[in-house]
C-alpha cells in the first residue's frame, strides 16, 4: 500500500533498524520504544489487522514473532518479553504489527500504560538492532 509507513519499510523505501527480513515478515526497532530493544514484527503484505491476515500466513508470521521473542532477551539481557498487538484502537500505523518488548522484573511497566523512550543516537539503535539480529542467528 503506497501510503503505509510499514509497507514502505518492508519495501526498503523507508530506512529502519531491521533485525530480521524474511519471507514471513520483517522485524525492526520501534522508534519510540517502551524499552530499548522493542521490536515491531510485521507481515510482508499490507494487512490492517489480525482478522485480515490470511490463514496460510498465520503459522509463518507467528513463528517469526516467536523467534523474535526468543532473541530479544538473549540480545538485551532482559529476563523475558511482553508480546502485544493492537487492532484498530491504539494502532498508530494501520498495518498489523506485533510488539515484542524486553522485560525485566521491576522495570516499571504497569498495565497498558507504555512510557516511551528514545535511543540516544542512531548508533545506539543500530547496536540494539545488530545484537537482536545476531541472536536470531
Image (cartoon, rainbow, N blue to C red):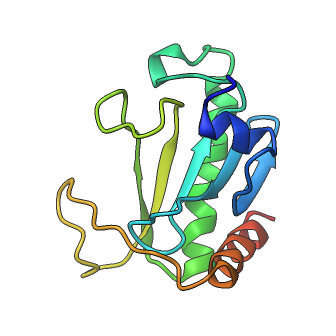
Report the side of 104 relative to 136 (left or right).
left
In the rendered view of the protein, which quadrant contains the C terminus?
bottom right
- The residue at 24%/69% (across/down) is 109
Report the side of 116 relative to 118 (left or right).
left
Rendered position, 28 above or below 104: above
In the rendered view of the protein, which quadrant contains the N terminus?
top right
Q: Give the tally of numbered discs.
A: 0
Q: Where is residue 3 in the image (x, y as percent from the top left)?
A: 62, 28
- The residue at 61%/75% (across/down) is 74
Question: 50 or 62: which is nearer to us?
Answer: 50
- The residue at 63%/39% (across/down) is 6
Rendered position, 127 above or below 86: below
Rendered position, 17 above or below 99: below
Q: Position of residue 122 (x, y in %)?
A: 66, 78
Question: 9 or 105: which is nearer to us?
Answer: 9
Q: Where is residue 23 in the image (x, y as percent from the top left)?
A: 82, 35
Q: Where is residue 98 in the image (x, y as percent from the top left)?
A: 50, 43
The part of the image, by quadrant, that contains residue 117 is bottom left
- The residue at 61%/39% (across/down) is 5
Rendered position, 37 above or below 43: below
Report the side of 114 relative to 137 (left or right).
left
Amino acid at each position: 500500500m503506497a501510503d503505509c509507513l510499514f509497507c514502505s519499510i518492508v519495501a526498503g523505501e523507508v530506512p529502519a533498524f531491521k533485525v530480521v527480513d524474511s519471507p514471513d515478515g520483517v522485524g525492526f526497532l520501534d522508534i519510540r520504544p517502551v524499552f530499548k530493544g522493542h521490536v515491531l514484527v510485521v507481515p510482508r503484505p499490507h494487512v490492517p489487522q489480525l482478522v485480515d491476515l490470511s490463514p496460510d500466513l498465520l503459522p509463518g508470521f507467528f513463528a517469526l514473532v516467536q523467534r523474535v521473542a526468543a532473541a530479544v532477551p538473549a540480545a538485551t539481557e532482559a529476563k523475558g518479553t511482553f508480546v502485544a498487538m493492537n487492532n484498530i484502537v491504539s494502532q498508530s500505523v494501520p498495518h498489523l504489527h506485533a510488539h515484542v518488548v524486553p522485560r525485566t522484573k521491576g522495570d516499571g511497566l504497569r498495565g497498558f500504560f507504555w512510557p516511551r523512550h528514545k535511543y540516544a543516537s542512531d548508533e545506539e539503535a543500530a547496536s540494539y538492532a545488530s545484537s537482536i539480529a545476531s541472536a536470531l542467528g
